[in-house]
Amino acid sequence: MKTLNVLKKASLVVIFLLVGTVVFATSAEVAVAEKKLGESVKETFKNDISKVGNYLYENKIVKLNDVVNVTFKVNDSNDLVLLKASCSNCNASEYAKYVFGLGLMKADDLLAGKAYEMDIVLKFKAK
């Protein structure tokens, strides 16, 4: 009888350790996905700002040197949905809204339903 109780307790400990390992692995995966998300957002802005004929050219914005604080959510389709863009320069805020509105940025499935806030540095000077 004692042996059976010891085996049951040992089984519970093993099951707990396995579940704990899965949770930690998922946390590590989320951290990697979040890092990739930040890099993807920055790369999207970098690519768009360097295009000839982009939003900035079209709207006759000749210079930006601003930090835009953006808050966005990852929806169920893994698209980034902008919730807020704030900056002292309204041109920079509108540009951030435009880039998010393009729908070019996607997130990993692990991040669906989560909201994020980040600062995006915008440096642009028309040539």
Image: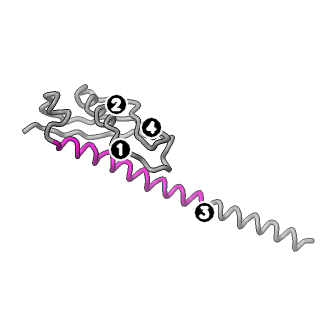
Question: What percent of the width, then of the height, locates residue 110?
Answer: 50, 50
Q: Is residue 58 above or below residue 103?
A: above
Q: What separation in Å lies between label 3 and label 2 (alpha carbons)?
A: 38 Å
Q: Earlier in the sequence, mark 3 or mark 4?
A: 3
Query: Disc 3 residue type?
Result: Thr
Residue highlighted by disc 3:
21
Query: Disc 4 residue type?
Result: Lys
Q: What separation in Å lies between label 1 and label 4 (alpha carbons)?
A: 12 Å
Q: Earlier in the sequence, mark 2 or mark 4?
A: 4
Asked if the residues shown at circle 3 and circle 4 are in contact, with their CB atoms under 8 angstroms apart, the answer is: no
Q: Which mark is residue 105?
A: 1
Query: Disc 2 residue type?
Result: Ala
Q: Give the quarter of the image for residue 63.
A: top left
Asked if the residues shown at circle 1 and circle 2 are in contact, with their CB atoms under 8 angstroms apart, the answer is: no
Residue highlighted by disc 2:
85
Nearer to us of marks 1 and 4 is 1
Q: Residue furthest bottom?
A: 3
Residue highlighted by disc 4:
73
Q: Is residue 49 above or below residue 20?
A: above
Query: Disc 1 residue type?
Result: Met
Residue pictured at 18% horizontal, 33% vertical: 56
Q: What separation in Å lies between label 1 and label 3 (alpha carbons)?
A: 31 Å
In the structure shown, which secondary structural element does the residue marked by tag 3 occupy?
Answer: helix
Q: Nearer the viewer, residue 72 or 16?
A: 72
